[in-house]
Amino acid sequence: MKPFPRLRKFLQYAALAGLGLLAAGLLVVFGTGDFGATQCVLNGLETRALAHRSTLLDRLALKALYQALLVVGRVRHPQAAEFLAYYCAGRGDTLRFDAAPLLRHPEVQLALRHHKQAISFRHHAPTQPRHHVVRRTDPDLYYAFDLLFIRQRPGRVVFYDQYYFQPLARRSRTAFRLGRVRFQLNDGLIHVAYPRARPFTTYGEVRTNGR
């Protein structure tokens, strides 16, 4: 009789069963919603972070949430996920991206025709006359850039953005959706999960036919 191999198999089966139940539970939650439970937890995390009393469990929970955003983002918002992963890694240097697809965006074309200095991909009341505001929020580009600066030069267009998150105390929040789970996440909480995360610049340059 060798009890240890049997015990090992039992633990393996138990772990697999636990993971199966967890996956099933997550599918149910993502399919039906969480009735505000996620937001309630995030509110508690934010309150403790503002009081400088974040716990190890808080940091682990936030890391799990950001990883979930990365996994979902790679499917639905790949450029935003790339930028978020870069930020979490804490590199801080310039991230260059392919700007050519932006020239096909009708709102970007409109901003270029009117020689705007920036474009906001989140619809809101205009506050800067030199900024173009889209008529309808574009989630893909909003999560990636929100406000994207534009510099037009003969034969080329440069797009760039300062990628950073507001301080916790400013309570700047971004709305997210995972399945049917909706919540608002304080931008500054990323520094609780990833204290070494550093702001960086995104830069994209595309050649045009103009002179």
Image (cartoon, rainbow, N blue to C red):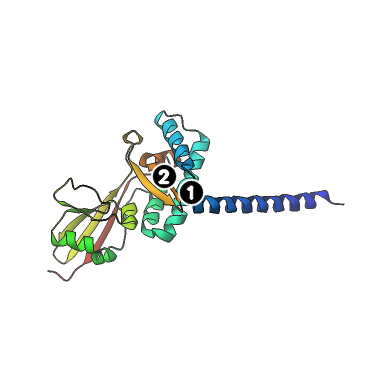
Q: Depth check: 188 or 172 in front?
A: 172
- In the rendering, which numbered label is found on residue 139? none
Amino acid at pointer 2 = Phe
Amino acid at pointer 1 = Gly
Vertical comparison of 208 with 130: above or below: below
- Residue 86 shown left or right of residue 158 in the figure: right
Name the residue rendered at 54%, 54% in the picture: 27
Q: CA distance from mark 1 to mark 2?
A: 11 Å
Residue 199 screen position, x and y as percent: 33, 45
Q: Disc 2 designates what residue?
A: 183
Q: Secondary structure at mark 1?
A: loop
Q: Disc 1 designates what residue?
A: 33
Residue 91 screen position, x and y as percent: 38, 49
**Are the residues at dot 1 and dot 2 in contact (C-beta closer than 8 Å)?**
no
Q: Sequence-wise, which precedes: disc 1 or disc 2?
A: 1
Mark 1 or mark 2, which is nearer to you?
1
